[in-house]
Amino acid sequence: MDTELAELVGVLLGDGSIGIYKSWPHGREKTQFRIKVTLNSEKDSQYARYVAALFLCVFHRAPIIRKRKSEKALDVYLLGKQNVEFLLAQGMSLSPKWGRAVVPERFLRPPLDKLVIRG
């Protein structure tokens, strides 16, 4: 699983986000924990299935793949507090990542470093 996790870390650093959001379904406040990767729906649909397989391997849960209406984008995402907490424990940071994204220390050494870059 370390190899798949390292590659998923790279994917998340490039095209992903890790977030904790407030929502109000049915007028009640709810906290949503979400890991999401956004890809091009026309060029990356096959890659989206590969990313979904990484999610399944790492989290043992199949993510949702959803095309955005009126956009050439699709999201591969997984909800769940335990999933977000797992990534944070690995050294990942919550989004937004601009100017503060860091590759966690354990993924900077061979052989995992190349897998992060591949992601």
Image: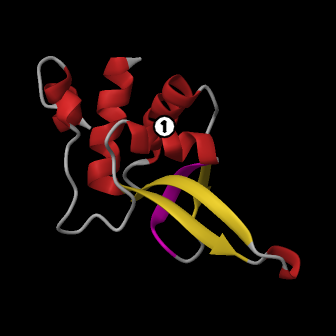
The extreme bottom residue here reads: 27
Q: Quadrant of the C terminus?
A: top left
Q: Position of residue 16 (x, y in %)?
A: 38, 54
Please state which of residues 82 and 69 is positioned toward the viewer in this rendering.
82
Residue at the location (36% across, 36% down)?
90
Which three-letter amino acid code belongs to the residue tagged 1?
Phe
Res 59 quadrant in image? top right
The extreme front residue here reads: 89
Residue at the location (61% across, 25% down)?
60
Callout 1 environment at 10 Å: few (<14), some (14 to 19), or many (20+)? Answer: few
Q: Position of residue 62 (x, y in %)?
A: 63, 34
Residue at the location (33% across, 55% down)?
15
* Horizontal side of residue 27 vs 51, given as left or right: right
Residue at the location (17% across, 68% down)?
99
Question: Is residue 50 placed above or below 78 in the rendered structure?
Answer: above
Instruction: Label 1, secondary structure: give it.
Output: helix
Q: Position of residue 31 (x, y in %)?
A: 67, 65
The dominant secondary structure in magenta is strand
Q: Which residue is mark 1?
A: 86
Q: Position of residue 104 (x, y in %)?
A: 23, 39
Question: Is residue 44 placed above or below 117 in the rendered structure?
Answer: below
Question: Is residue 52 placed above or below 88 in the rendered structure?
Answer: above
**Coloration mode:** secondary structure
Q: Tell me which segment is drawn in magenta.
A: 71-79
- On whether residue 42 falls in the magenta region, the answer is no
* Horizontal side of residue 8 vs 77, given as left or right: left
Res 69 quadrant in image? bottom right
* Horizontal side of residue 56 vs 29, given as left or right: left
Q: Quadrant of the N terminus?
A: top left
